[in-house]
Amino acid sequence: KAGVTQTPRYLIKTRGQQVTLSCSPISGHRSVSWYQQTPGQGLQFLFEYFSETQRNKGNFPGRFSGRQFSNSRSEMNVSTLELGDSALYLCASSPNRGPTDTQYFGPGTRLTVL
Amino acid sequence: GNSVTQMEGPVTLSEEAFLTINCTYTATGYPSLFWYVQYPGEGLQLLLKATKADDKGSNKGFEATYRKETTSFHLEKGSVQVSDSAVYFCALSGSGAGSYQLTFGKGTKLSVIP
C-alpha cells in the first residue's frame, strides 16, 4: 500500500505570496492532519480534516487554511506569507478518528520564504 | 492542556551501547502514547505505540512501557547501531472528546558512532 504523499517536496516563495500544499493520504484513510515543524517551535498541530470537514484547529492565524476533498485528499493554503512561515509542513493520515488511531506521516513539504 | 517533556539532546553513544530516552507527559484522561523517529530529510515514522496503562510497545529492538503512575513512556534499546542515528519524538494523542491531534516533545537527536 502506498504511503502518504505530499507535493511539492520543496518550495521557495517570497513574502506576501500565497502557497498551496497537497497531501494524498494512504488509501482508505479518512482523516488527514497537518503539522508545522520548525527548529524553534518543534512540531505543532495545524488542523485536522475528516469527511471533508475541519474537525480541529491548532493555534495558527487565519492565514493558514485547508480543505479536504471527497477522495480524502487534502490541501493547505497559506496566504500573505511571512518569513516565519518557513518550515517543514507534514501531513499525516489515519484510518479514522480516535485516540488509539495511528497517524502515518508523509515526507513533508519544505517551504522557504524569502 | 496536554504536554510532553523529553530529555534534551543531543545524545551520542557508541555502537552496542544501551539507550534510554526519557519521556513524561501531562494529559487529561487516558491518552495513547507514541514514539516516532525522523531520519535526515524525511518525515516521521512510527516506531512504536501503547494505548493503555502497562502496555509495552516494541519494534526493531526498541521498547517503551506506558506507566500511568509516573506518567512516563521512556524509550529503551539494548544495543544501538549506527543506523539508529536519528531524531526521536515522544507524542501523545489528545484524549479530550473529539480532539485527537498529536502533541509532541521537542525531540532527542541520537548519534551512534562506530
Image (cartoon, rainbow, N blue to C red):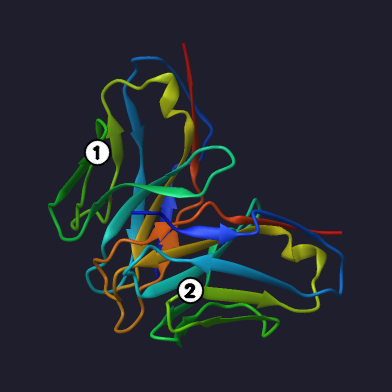
- State the residue in front, A18 or B2: A18
Number of the label disc, if any, that sits on residue B59: 1
In-image side of B55 versus A95 (left or right): left
Depicted B70 relative to depicted A26: above or below: above
| Residue B52 location, quadrant | bottom left
Residue plotted at (51% across, 51% down): B106
Q: Count of labels shown?
A: 2
Amino acid at pointer 2: Arg
Q: Position of residue B33 (x, y in %)?
A: 29, 57
In-image side of B28 versus A61 (left or right): left
Element type where label 1 sits in the image? strand
Depicted A33 relative to depicted A49: above or below: above
Outermost residue on the bottom side: it is: A53
Amino acid at pointer 1: Asn
- State the residue in front, A4 or B16: A4
Residue plotted at (31% across, 22% down): B18
Q: How crowded is mark 2: few (under 14 residues within 10 Å), some or many (20 or more)?
A: many
Q: Residues within 10 Å of mark 1 (few under 14, many from 20)?
A: few
In-image side of B103 versus A77 (left or right): left
Task: Report the quarter where the N terminus of chain B lies.
Answer: bottom left
- State the residue in front, A96 or B30: A96
Q: Where is residue A23 in the image (x, y as percent from the top left)?
A: 53, 66
Q: Name the residue under label 2.
A: A73
Q: Position of residue A5 (x, y in %)?
A: 50, 58
Chain under callout 1:
B
Residue plotted at (66% across, 77% down): A77
Q: Position of residue A14 (x, y in %)?
A: 87, 65
Residue plotted at (33% across, 33% down): B20
